[in-house]
Amino acid sequence: MPEGHTIHRLAADHRAHFLTRPLRVTSPQGKFSDSAALLDRQVMTAAEAHGKHLFLGFEAIGWVHIHLGLFGKVDLGATPAPPAGETVRLRLATPEAYLDLRGPTTCALITDGEKAAIHDRLGPDPLREGDDPDRAWARISRSRTTIAALLMDQKIIAGVGNVYRAEVLFRHGVDPYRTGREITRAQWDAMWADLAELMREGVRNNRIDTVRPEHLPEAMGREPRVDDHGGEVYVYRRAQLPCHICGTEIRTAGLAARNLFWCPGCQPPGPPAV
């Protein structure tokens, strides 16, 4: 499932190619055809993201709410667009560019009130200007749930997925099985700031890289990572390989319905740091 940086990147792409433009809107698959007919030739007035949710605004009509889920994909290109296959849920087009949406969990036309309700149920997003990490801290600091599970709960913090979860915990030496109430405020503030910076880099580079300069392949004399994820990471999908820093074998286990990755050497169990 795409993480929050991907959705913020998509929002920026929509603003760059479609904002303030009258759009041709179609649903070749047919599942969005009634709404597409209402939107066709209307002007897109906004494109924004909150966590893993994308919202496309059409002032006179409402918002297209998109959640890619596990299987959703977006193709953006220059016109002329290729023939739209029967899997395309939504196509947006101008004389210069087109965008095809396939396989999303959600693609629905919603009202302002329905959009507000979605924002209300989501936690703060490190990439949204003005979102308050105190809202997340208020819940984390009281919780007996593991910090690894809390970071994946979109009601607590929006946009963090499996890669950023594993990597930010490693970067701050936090045992993923430590409970929320065992995390110190200083640790939380540092992790929030780190997530914001890492995810901003993800938006800029369109990939996730979490390895500090001193641990990059060229600095350590090691081979670059080869993986369809793309970026340089410390622990994500590196089970049974040695840690870049301490050499301990990276471990994996199921947690919160996803595979967790961590280094027992760099993220030892025990009481929280003071």
Image: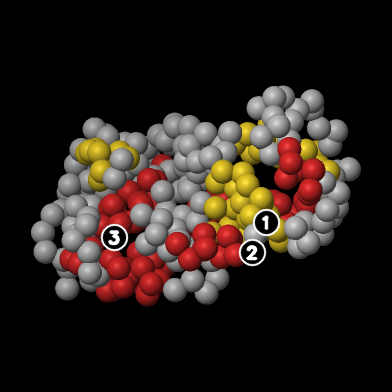
**Quick one: SS at disc 2?**
helix
> Is residue 57 left or right of 150 when viewed as pictured?
right
Q: Residue drawn at (42%, 35%), measured in percent from left and top? A: 225
Q: Residue drawn at (45%, 66%), measured in percent from left and top? A: 124
Residue in the foreground of this view, choosing between 42 and 251: 42
The residue singled out by tag 3 in the image is 172
> Is residue 268 left or right of 243 when viewed as pictured?
left
The residue singled out by tag 2 in the image is 112
The residue singled out by tag 1 in the image is 63
Q: Is residue 33 above or below residue 48?
A: above
Separation of marks 1 and 2 at Cα, in angstroms:
7 Å
Q: Residue furthest left?
A: 270
Amino acid type shown at disc 1: Trp
Amino acid type shown at disc 3: His
Residue in the foreground of this view, choosing between 143 and 249: 143
Is the Cβ of the residue at disc 1 closer than 8 Å to that at disc 2? yes
Q: Earlier in the sequence, mark 1 or mark 2?
A: 1
Amino acid type shown at disc 2: Asp
**Quick one: SS at disc 1?**
strand
